[in-house]
Amino acid sequence: MQTDELASPVETDALVIGAGPVGLYLVFQLGLQGIRAHVLDTLRHAGGQPVELYGDKPIYDIPGLPACTGQELADRLLQQVAPFQPAFHFGQLVAAIERLADNWFVVSTDKGLTFRTRSVFIAAGVGAFLPKKLALAELAPFEDTQVLYHPPEALDVTGQHIVIAGGDQAALEWAIQLAERPAARAARSITLLHRRDVLQVDEHTLARWHELLREGLVSFVVGQIKGVLQSDGPHRTMTGLHISHPDGTESNCVADRLVVLQGISPKLGPLSNWGLAMSRKQLTVDTSTFATSQPGIFAIGDIVHYPGKKKLLACGFHEGVLAAFGAAEFLHPERTGPLEYTSSSQRLQQLLGVSGPA
Ligand SMILES: Cc1cc2nc3c(=O)[nH]c(=O)nc-3n(C[C@H](O)[C@H](O)[C@H](O)COP(=O)(O)OP(=O)(O)OC[C@H]3O[C@@H](n4cnc5c(N)ncnc54)[C@H](O)[C@@H]3O)c2cc1C
């Protein structure tokens, strides 16, 4: 379903910002209304907070599901929405929304994707999940080339000196998968750099890490980056890092690539500049349709505020239902008919692909 390489601008009826649980359920409800959506998220996967913040922890208050983990909830929502074939675009931060004279919107991302859409749905939760960056200006010129915050899984590291900054599960798993690559694709050196000598990982990962350390396939440096070593000449490249250690000593470390995996944190980001009415840093909405102050832009989930709002999954799902009905009325007023049930409507069942033609 991932479609990253698109000719911009993409034209669509509906564009959803946020592939968290509420955004996913909204896409399902839009599907029942006959509206196919494009979905954008800064993360590399769907699921929002339940996957990022409590993926392996149980949730007990989803209607009809006595217990499921955050990851399981996301998997089930993706399975439910699959018949409507939404187009997901991951690793994309929505940077701007502009209304055109014909009342369509142009939505653009930090990676240069542009959409022309008739309606926009903001399901941005507590903000865009973005990687925590290293606070060292000297690294900025090398970002996306030698300094990577979103390393692609198949990153080519052949013959290179790789430094991984971080000390949690994601950083260790990355270091381990690099160390386990076949000789033909192997890095020249793999160094894990963390400010403390305590690693926050599960037992199995820690055991594997110690094996690789003993075999000399990886090394571990405790310290913080204080500077960047660079090549001379007009086209500067990063050649290494200057590191300070907790005992007050300093050293240099060769680095062709620095992969930073220090976790993620949500940032409200550009959303506050989109000219929408807000209260307490959240979007205010009409609770009958979840329309924002701008016709054609709807908002649901943790990002909205209204009297009595509760930041709970069940509340967000309800908001998605009403937003989808509101959007159907906005986009296709001519189609409005009586309420139909998925349990009995052949039309809806056909849309879901669960019954033959009527
Ligand atoms: C630790 C914890 C436990 C919880 N347990 C429960 C529970 O047991 N039961 C319950 O009902 N609720 C629980 N919640 C609350 C629940 O997780 C939230 O209500 C729910 O995740 C809100 O869903 P959402 O889709 O609105 O937002 P989110 O889950 O935050 O998803 C929003 C998505 O939008 C993306 N995004 C935001 N801005 C942009 C942008 N500009 N461009 C691109 N993408 C963007 C983000 O990256 C994110 O993936 C818990 C929350 C936490 C933190």
Image (tube, rainbow, N blue to C red):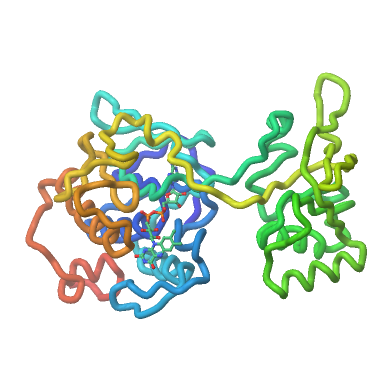
Q: Position of residue 196 (x, y in %)?
A: 75, 54
Q: Residue at x 67, y 40 (%)?
A: 134
Q: Nearer the viewer, residue 329 or 230?
A: 230
Give the vertical position of 217 relative to 232 (above or below). Answer: below
Judge whether residue 31 can be spotted in this image: no
Most extreme residue toward the top is 234
Q: Residue at x 88, y 52 (%)?
A: 189
User: How many numbered marks are there?
Assistant: 0
Most extreme residue toward the front is 247
Q: Is residue 336 left or right of residue 129?
A: left
Q: Position of residue 161 (x, y in %)?
A: 86, 47
Q: Residue at x 68, y 31 (%)?
A: 140
- The quadrant in which the C terminus is found is bottom left
Give the vertical position of 113 relative to 322 (above or below). Answer: above
Q: Is residue 279 left or right of residue 286?
A: right
Q: Is residue 106 left or right of residue 190?
A: left
**Quarter of image, ligand 1:** bottom left
Judge whether residue 134 can be spotted in this image: yes
Where, by quadrant of the figure, is residue 29 drawn? Answer: bottom left
Q: Nearer the viewer, residue 70 or 355?
A: 70
Q: Position of residue 172 (x, y in %)?
A: 73, 61
Q: Residue at x 84, y 63 (%)?
A: 182
Q: Position of residue 69 (x, y in %)?
A: 46, 72
Most extreme residue toward the bottom is 66
Q: Is residue 348 left or right of residue 69?
A: left
Give the vertical position of 153 relative to 136 (above or below). Answer: below
